[in-house]
Structure formats: structure tokens, C-alpha cells
Amino acid sequence: MTQASPRLVLGALGLERGGILLLKRALQALAPGERLEVCGESPELPVHLRAWARAQGQGFTEQDGRLWLTRADHGRWRGAERAGGVAAAGVVETPQARWGLAARGALVEAGAPTFHFVLNEKSEVWAEEAGRLYAQAAAAQWDPATAIPWDAEITHPDEVEDAVVQVMTYLIENETAALLVPARFLGQLHPHFREVMQLLAITAADEARHIEVFTRRASLRRETLGLSTHGGQASLKTLLEEPDFALASFLLSVLGEGSFLSLLWFLQEHAPDVITRQVCRLAAQDEARHVAFGLAHLSRHVALDPGLRGRLALAIQSRNQALAQTAGLNEEVFDALVILAAGGFEPEQIALGHDRVLTLHHDMDHGRRVRLERLGFSEEEAAALSALHTRNFM
Amino acid sequence: MTLLLGAVAYDPKVVTIWEGFCTLFARHGLDVDYVLYSHYERQVEALFSGQVHVAWNSPLAHLQTERLAAKAGRQARAFCMRDSDQDLTSLVLVRRDDPAQTLADLKGRVVAVGAVDSPQATLLPLGALARAGLQPGVDVTVKLHDVLRGKHGDHIGGERDAVRALVRGEADAACVIDGNHLLFTREGTLAPGAVRTLYQTPPYDHCVFSALDTAPQAEVARLKELLLGMSYDDPEARPLLDLEGLKQWREGRTSGLAQLDEAITRLGSIDAWLSEAAARL
């Protein structure tokens, strides 16, 4: 029997320098109870092999200068469970709490600790487009230091610069909400939904960059920023306090960021300097992805749970009631937008600017209605709900 | 009734281990609570005073229990142990270029050992030196590394310090358990090939569960049954077995303690304690 045992020849390699790896590999090939002869020239091999085998619960025999291991019959991986599949097709409906932080597709040891991720239903969070949108986002990351011509000339009058600073101040406040909302849900999401997790993370990073460039633009010519109003913050607070992922992403991404897309395009067209125009162009690119994800996962969610549509409608109505006593968009932001769209202070120019801001409102409303209809609301429902959206835009 | 189990708190993880095991025992209907001691001598005496019914003992503590039981006209037994506590060996290491070829060649030289009460790093190697005709403290200078005295060498620090003393040239030999030689080489405390084994003890055993003949028999039998039935394949038991460093509990045996028994007899290591403890009974 001894002669028939498989042999592992370690040569001069000791267990202290990686020999253990070869031992484990050789034992893996054996059935429990089978013997492995271990040969080697390291003078410490008998001592180390005995100690290692004992610690591992493997049998050890030393006889006439020859060394054997006997493979034990206990296994750490008995009862282990595969945590879904690595590809998107391997996403399961309800990942186990004990899969925890394990990579999707990994083999998870039985008895691993449980993690309590609140967002653990595929129907609530998943969108087939998540992986593609994440890849697109990763490829489209831009460097604020080089993507914007910070040294470009600013020639417009001080009053116009004041308007730019006020709009930037408003954008920073809103983008802060747009960063914190996905960041908060990111910590509640089961990591099994890897692509969604990555997308929420990169969304937060996008917003961090937007905050950076809006701040930098606002500070180019001014040491202080513009105004922050009670109404604006009250509107954003309702977003931050919405505990439901579907409702929060509906209010933030589909309605809020959707409206912001129109605003950023408006600024890209009417801002008085190339720096502001470029800042808004790049931010709009990112926001379009955020809106796309919100629409994608909510469309899927609504298809699986048609009752969600009623809850979405109710969320707009509740928010409208909660904000009924607030002023909505602050007057200074409205005026600033008019000034930027006017291009001057002549009465005709101001009238034109005013008309353009009203057109912006119409564009925002139109965009919201289109997106609401994509979620299955009728034309009438979409029009009514869009009209209830916060006057603060976000 | 609640079976009271004594253990020595040589490390904070001891709390996690026994909390976990007691929860597992409770799930199988056995009510076990544990009492932690700061050293084994206190635990041995607690076994005799009835503070605890069973004790998770070092090999030296079990021999102390046996000897004290003999004086008290009682009987001690070892009813369970870890698989990893069977067939250990200790080593006497010297630097690679040291001229010594046998233990006797260490005469007049400095031998670094672990804690004064460590079976593996002090008592067994010094017993071997004594058997080879070298009386510790007379024929060889013993350099103690007394980390956590009373813990019977459960703390690894004493052995690591002994090996460092050898490497630095402050000692001519160092005594360690075989597993720590592998560990110290892997972690870099010992450079590969820097030392060689001058002497390796015959295999011996380590910790055991001790009980006296007065322990509640049914509960001790159930405890033993639950321990022996514990499987590394069980995901609830596995983290505890990993922490405690075993794959499987085994039937207790004392044949593996004979070498230590002989060493402490030869060295007189526990004579003074035994007289004092017997007087307190």
C-alpha cells in the first residue's frame, strides 16, 4: 500500500517557502483516507510537516525516515453556496443575506455572517441597462482640470456675472441633493446587484465633479456665492427624506434631473462665457445617464408591479402638498436666468429673455410628460402630474 | 443543573470561544456556563473547591490536578482533547554554524526558553537536558522569557523572544514547539536555514479537559458526547473550532503526558506549589 501511495517531491523547497501550496494541491487530488508520501531535502521537513498536518487536521506518519500524510475527511467548503452568476444573467431575484459582500458568482462558505441590505429585491432595483450605462459612465469621465477652458476670457458686465454666480449657487445646492440621494441608497443596496451598485457610485462621483466645477465657476470672479432660499432647501429636503428607493429615484432622476437636463441645455445655449457653457454641457451629458437609469429601472419595476404607478403619482401629489406653502424657484434664480437669456438690459432684450425662460418651463414640462408617459401614464395623467412637479425644478 | 466550566483567559478571544460553545451546548439541551481564571493554578484549585466542575487545562495543569487529587484521595481524569493537541514535539534549536551535535554539547552554555511554566518551551526541553546529564541552572544557564506567567506557555510571545535571543547571539540554543518553528520561519523571525534542530523531543500531548471523580457524571458525559459529536463541516461550529485551533475533538488520553510528568518530577517544577495547594485543601 505504501508503494502505491502518490508521492510529492519537494526537492529543496521547504514548507516555509511555499511548499504548503504544493502540499494542499497534492492533497486536493486525493480522496479522504488516501495517503501521500512527501519527499524533500529540507532538513526541517519532518518537523514542519508534522506541525502543519496537526494544525490542518491531516494525518501524519513518520516511519524509517519516510513521511506520509493521510487526507482528512473534513471540508470547509461543504455546504458552500454559489452566489448567483458573474454575468448579468446570473442575477437572482432575491440574493441571500449571507452572500453579503461576496463577489457575484463566488462560492460562499456556509455560516458566513448575514448582512441586512434593505434593497435586496431585483424587481426594486434592477435594470438590464445598468451594466451598459455604468460602462458608458466610466468611459465618459472627464477631468475638471482639463475639460474646461478655465483661462478663457470673461468680458461680460458685473451684473451678468452676478447672475452666473446666482445660477451656479443654485446648481451646487441641487447637485448636492443629487449626490446624497443615490449615495444613501448605495449603502442599502445588496452588492449582488453589482452593476446598479457601480452605477449609483459613479453617479455620486459625477455629482461630486459637478459640484466642483460649479463651485469653481462661481468663484472665478467672486469671493462670495449667491443666495440659498428656504423654498429651495425645503424642496430638496423632501427628496432627501424620501425613504423609498423607487419613489426617490422617480422624484430625483425622472422628474428632477430630467428637468435639470432642460436647464443645463438652456444654460449651454445662453450662458455669457465659454467656461459656463462648457461646464453645463459636460454636466448635462452625465445627467442624461442618470435620467436614463431612473427611467430604465422604474419601467421594469412598473411592468412587474403595476401598482407602483399609483404610488409614484401619489408621491408627486404628496410632495406638491408638502411644498404648497413654499415659494418655489427663488426669484433671484428666475431673474438670473432671464438676464442670461436676455444678453443685455434693454427692455426688448429683457422681454426676449423672459420669453426664453418661459419656453424653458415649457420644455421642462414637455420632457416630464414624455418620461411619465414612458412609465405608462396616460397623456392626461402625465400632464396633470407634470404640473404638480416642484417649482424649484429639482 | 448548570455545568460550570473553567478556562484560562490567555487571550481576549477566549470569551468569544466559550460564549460560542456554550450557545451550541444550550442548543443541544446542555446548560453550561464558564468561569475564566487568570492563571492555571487558580483554576486547578477551583476544580477542587467545586467552583467549577470541569476545567480546560494545560497539560501541566492536568498533572497538577492529578497530583493534588492523589494527595486528596480523589481521582482526576482527562475526558476530551483537541486533535491538534496530540503528538506535538518540541525542538532545541542552535545557530546553523554552532559546533554542538548533541544536547550534552550545550554544557556551560546559555539556553533560551519560554515562560517558566511552559511545558513545550521550557519544562520538556529542560527535562530532556536533565536526562542528558545537564542540570538546568548548574550545567547550563537558563534564560527565561516569562511572558504571562501562570498561563503555562499559552502565549506565543515567550517562544518568539527565546528565538530572537538565539538569533541575536544572546543565547546558544532556543526551545520552541515544532509548529512555532514553522510559524517563525514563515513570518521571518527566523531566516530560512539560520538555525538547525539539535534535538527533537518524542511526541507528546497538550491540553485536556479535566474532571474530578466528584463532578456531575451525567452532565460531564453529555458534554463529552457533544464535543466528540462536533463537526468541522457544521458552519455554526466551524468558526469556533477555527478560533480554538482544532478540526475535531478527541477522546482524552494521558499517555501523552508521561514525558512532561517525568520532566517535572526530575526538575521538581511543581513541588512547592503542590505542598501549598495540598495544605489549602
Image (spheres, rainbow, N blue to C red):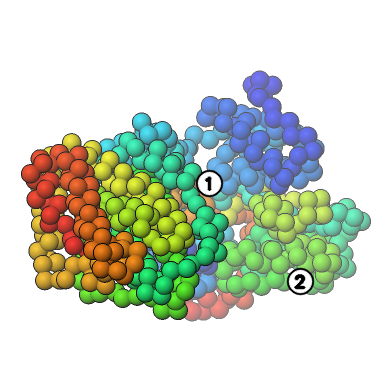
Residue for point 42% across, 35% down? A86
Quadrant location of residue A60? Answer: top right
Quadrant, the N terminus of chain A? top right
Q: Which residue is the site of mark 1? A: B83
Q: Is residue A128 above or below residue B98?
A: above
Q: Which chain is disc 2 placed on?
A: B
Q: Amino acid at mark 2?
A: Lys
Kindly state the secondary structure of the residue where label 2 is placed. Answer: strand
Kindly state the secondary structure of the residue where label 1 is placed. Answer: helix
Q: Residues within 10 Å of mark 2 (few under 14, many from 20)?
A: many
Q: Which chain is disc 1 placed on?
A: B
Q: Amino acid at mark 1?
A: Asp
A349 left or right of B169 in image:
left
Q: Is residue B261 above or below residue B47?
A: above
A169 left or right of B270 in image:
left
- Residue A112 shows up from this direction: no
Residue for point 47% across, 60% down? A275
Q: Residues within 10 Å of mark 1 (few under 14, many from 20)?
A: many
> Considering depth in this image, is A345 or B58 the residue closer to the camera?
A345
Q: Which residue is the site of mark 2? A: B143
> Considering depth in this image, is A183 or A223 the residue closer to the camera?
A223
CA–CA distance in space, label 2 to label 1: 31 Å
> Considering depth in this image, is A260 or B265 the residue closer to the camera?
A260
- Residue A11 shows up from this direction: yes
Residue A300: percent from left, percent from top: 23, 38
Quadrant location of residue A376? Answer: top left
> Considering depth in this image, is A76 or A237 the residue closer to the camera?
A237
- Of label 2 and label 1, which has the lower sequence position? 1
Residue for point 74% across, 34% down? A10
A129 left or right of B154 in image:
left
Residue A310: percent from left, percent from top: 10, 47
